[in-house]
Amino acid sequence: MGSTEGLAEWVRRAASGETSAFSELYRRTRPLVARLMAGFAPLDPDEVEDVIQETFVRAFRALPRLKEAGAFEAWLLSIARNRARTRLERKASVRRLEDDIADPEPETVPALPEALQLERDIEVVRQLISELPEGEEKRTVQLFYIEGELSAREIAEQLGVGKSAVTMRLERFRGRIKRELLRRVLAGRWE
Amino acid sequence: MRHLDDEALHALARREPDAVKYFREHLATACEACESFLATHSGPDVLDGQVDAVLLALAPPRSDAPLDEVGFARVRRRLRAPRLDTRKWGLIAGAVAAGLLAVVVVPRLRQGGTGVEVGTASQEPGVKGQVGRIALELAVVVRGADGSLRRLDPDTQVDSRDVLLLRYHATEAGTALLFQQRAGEEPQLLGPFALEAGTHDLQDPQGLSGVSLEGESGPLTLWLAASPTGLQPSVDEVKRVLVGEGERWEQGMLAVTRFDVRVRSSQNPR
């Protein structure tokens, strides 16, 4: 993952005003943000590009206020998800133009667990995927997250289902993982 | 039984002991209501980013990607360019457009007439037959820190608090790359643009059309390099043309205009 000390160092350099550090942060993290966007099948390529741009503009503007440099990657991905969801909801006319899903405040982003804990989390998620019943959801999750090559749109085409169906499967699975990680956070990391 | 909702999420974000204790136990087993809520709501904190980071780390690592120069230029441009007062810009735009063709605001063209001929044979591999070449002209209006607008002649001194607003005239549709170049440095990409035939403000899909001079000082050149629709030379290919090293087909297909200004730092007295 990119949340290494190396990335944190670039975050510190960017926060101190070093211009070249922004391009290095962009180079290192854009693929991750783009991969996250690939899960939002209803967004067309132009919308995806716009969301990616907006994500980095917001993150870079607020970067000097980010309390924990080591949390940059998670913070950036949170912003990206919020931007994509806002765009989707506006597209579906369930969110007004002037409303926006609020991004995590950079001043209050907490320190995140060490890399070792993240490795454990990855193992937990692998285990949860292996325990999924065989079927379309498991296949979708494997194609998108484990193989990591196809976009949700491409998966929809390959499986012969609608774009929204793939995104919904991924979101449902992600909700399960989020519950598990939240439980783990509540069980130890905040005490 | 209590499930996650906005109030509970806020309580967890504030680490309220009762909420932490209850949901630690409640979330130990699958709960469709809570999972559904978590899937569609952000937080607490950056948990969403943590979840996505873990999920995206499941795939085999990819090799280091080079910098997406065009994408980064767009981000940089959006960071630097303040949103324009479109009402004021609209007022001045008509006047600029009227004067555009009559007044000498056409910047110097490179390579002895590049961008003024039409209908040359393409030298690019894969592109056959006659390809129209764009004739391109550029006018610049400066917006001062006080909001005032004035048309700018080349080689004029401007203030680093100023914003340059660009307007072009193209003989046909195409694409363009806008660069800025400081003295002694390589041209730096500010962004790609779609050009329409006729006279238009230079703006990207977000509607931004200003070049902020914040942080600049000394001579600065703006380059606009346009190619007809269907021919899209890479950023590096265009850069080579700007510094006089381009291949023949690149030089032949590109219409290049430049506009020079001298930027005075706003920290110095006017």
Image (cartoon, coloured by chain):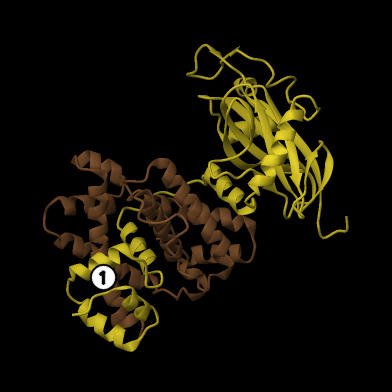
Chain colours: A brown, B yellow
What residue is rendered at 32% in x and 51% in y? Answer: A39
Task: Indicate the secondary structure of the residue bearing disc 1.
Answer: helix
Does residue B28 appear to the left or right of A184 in the view shown?
left
Compared with B117, A188 (above or below) is below
Compared with B56, B27 (above or below) is below
Residue A95 visible in image: yes
**Res. B208 image quadrant:** top right
Does residue A155 appear to the left or right of B269 in the view shown?
left
Percent position of residue B170, x then y: 64, 25
Percent position of residue B73, x then y: 58, 46
Residue farthest toward the right in the current orientation of the protein: B269
Does residue B28 appear to the left or right of A63 in the view shown?
left
Image mark 1: chain: A
Residue farthest toward the bottom in the current orientation of the protein: B17
Residue situated in front as seen by the camera: B60 or B227: B227
Badge 1 amino acid: Arg
Residue B187 visible in image: no
Q: Quadrant of the C terminus of chain B?
A: bottom right
Q: Quadrant of the N terminus of chain B?
A: bottom left
Does residue B266 appear to the left or right of A43 in the view shown?
right
Residue farthest toward the left in the current orientation of the protein: A134
Compared with B156, B251 (above or below) is above
Percent position of residue A170, x then y: 25, 55
Percent position of residue A181, x then y: 29, 71
**Res. A60 image quadrant:** bottom right
Residue situated in front as seen by the camera: B234 or B247: B234
Q: Which residue is mark 1?
A: A179
**Crowdedness near tag 1: few (<14), some (14–19) or many (≥20) residues, C-alpha within 10 Å:** many
Compared with A163, B17 (above or below) is below
What residue is rendered at 34% in x and 57% in y? Answer: B56
Count of marks placed on residues:
1
